[in-house]
Image: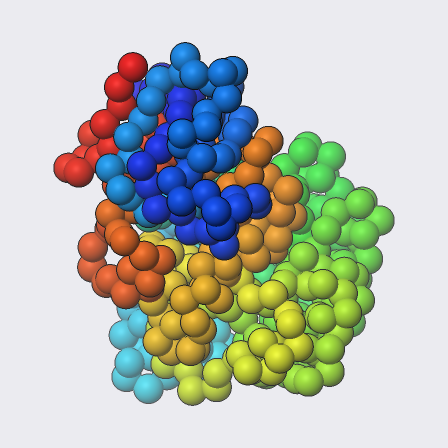
Amino acid sequence: MTFASLTSADGVWHNFIPARECFDSLEDSVREPAIAVRDGAIAWIGAAGQVPNDYATLPRHDCAGALVTPGLVDCHTHLVYAGDRAQEFAQRLAGASYEDIAHAGGGIVSTVRATRAADEDTLFALASQRLEVLLADGVCAIEIKSGYGLDLATERKQLRVARRLADAHGVTVRTSFLGAHALPPEYAGRSDDYITSVCDAMLPALAAEGLVDAVDAFCERIAFTRAQVDRVFAAAHALGLPVKLHAEQLSDMGGAALAARYRALSADHLEHLSAAGIAAMREAGTVAVLLPTAWYMLRDTQLPPIAALRAAGVPMAVATDHNPGTSPVLSLLVAINMACTLFRLTVPEVLAGVTRHGARALGLAATHGAIGMGRPANFVLWKLDSVAGLAYWLGQRPVQCIVRQGRIVGAGAPGAMAARH
């Protein structure tokens, strides 16, 4: 069955518990709300007893008391790759550090070898399986990075797969070109030359093909310097592309401040973020993307400065960072739980982190991360009586029904809503 053949979500959705903080406009006086969907978009929100005549003849969808939130946003993933790195996980358990493994020829470069060897259809099939698992958690928008090619042909292959995934699965996909992820073996000892290739050859070609929505980089001791990332961001800026950055994960390289200077959509990881970096992000409106599953998998001990980010009013998003090396996690709900238990985010903070702030980190604030009139119909019905349940449960998926891009997904599950005319 193709996504386009799924049942339309057009109709009036009622008898639900709204996550009110996620609605653009839902007055507190409205105790029994309803949502009208028409032509795949949210056309009206209001009291169930006051549905306008324009929508009176639409089908009625009884949500059976479900909690309703916007479709979730996973704003940082590396979903398209071949192979795995289970052996490296075992090495870390035996005492090797992430940096030790990278310096020995493992890490990102090992995934590059496997990804270069795989054809596009193989990468699509592998990524489709992963994406289906993530979507089952209520994800309706996702970022997918390249960065496991480190040459033009393979970076193109990864980004083409990301575009195909969006069409095949009916999900909003934002692509990030991550050519400056690691130094490929053929450029050993010539990192500046590689950055020249990224800026002058790869990025312009891929942007011209319409494959790039944003440009990312890894600013770290085992990756690229602040000056090299500055060159990449300048090239992106010249092409009119927004930027984001893997920043301050293993050390303080000043990457967050650099990203903020370019008005970056986000700076991600941030375990070693300084006060100066926080101030720069606040001024620029750059989202802090927290990745607790990677922190957990690496058995890190340096927490991101959550309290300082909170005090500064920097918006905090939460994502899975799905990747084969440091976060082989395919559940945004697990990331939500870890953000609360390990990083001490509150339930309202983590909900905003996977809705409004996650959407903002992808440049999708106008269309995703909230339920409001004129937005595409992306929302989730949960077999829960409060938002706290999203952070509480581990090992089960409380999804009752997903409306994604105006189509009903998974409505046949036990306890799912009943539609009537």
Specify whether residue 259 is in view: yes
Q: Residue at x 46, y 28 (%)?
A: 50
| Quadrant of the rendering where the N terminus is positioned | top left
Residue 364 in the image, given as x and y percentages of width and height: 61, 45
| Residue at far left of view | 414
Q: Residue at x 45, y 59 (%)?
A: 351
Can you tell which quarter of the image residue 91 is in?
Answer: bottom left
Vertically, is 333 above or below 211? below
Q: Closest to the observer: 105 or 331?
A: 331
Q: Number of marks in the image?
A: 0
Q: Residue at x 28, y 43 (%)?
A: 66
Residue 380 in the image, given as x and y percentages of width and height: 37, 41
Can you tell which quarter of the image residue 224 is in?
Answer: bottom right
Give the side of residue 103 with respect to residue 325, left or right: right
Give the side of residue 356 with respect to residue 104, left or right: right
Residue 177 in the image, given as x and y percentages of width and height: 62, 49
Q: Closest to the observer: 136 or 229?
A: 136
Give the side of residue 212 with respect to residue 77, left or right: right
Q: Residue at x 41, y 66 (%)?
A: 347
Specify whether residue 106 is in view: no
Q: Closest to the observer: 381 or 76?
A: 381
Give the side of residue 159 with respect to residue 400, left or right: right
Q: Closest to the observer: 21 or 402?
A: 21
Give the colour scheme shown: rainbow
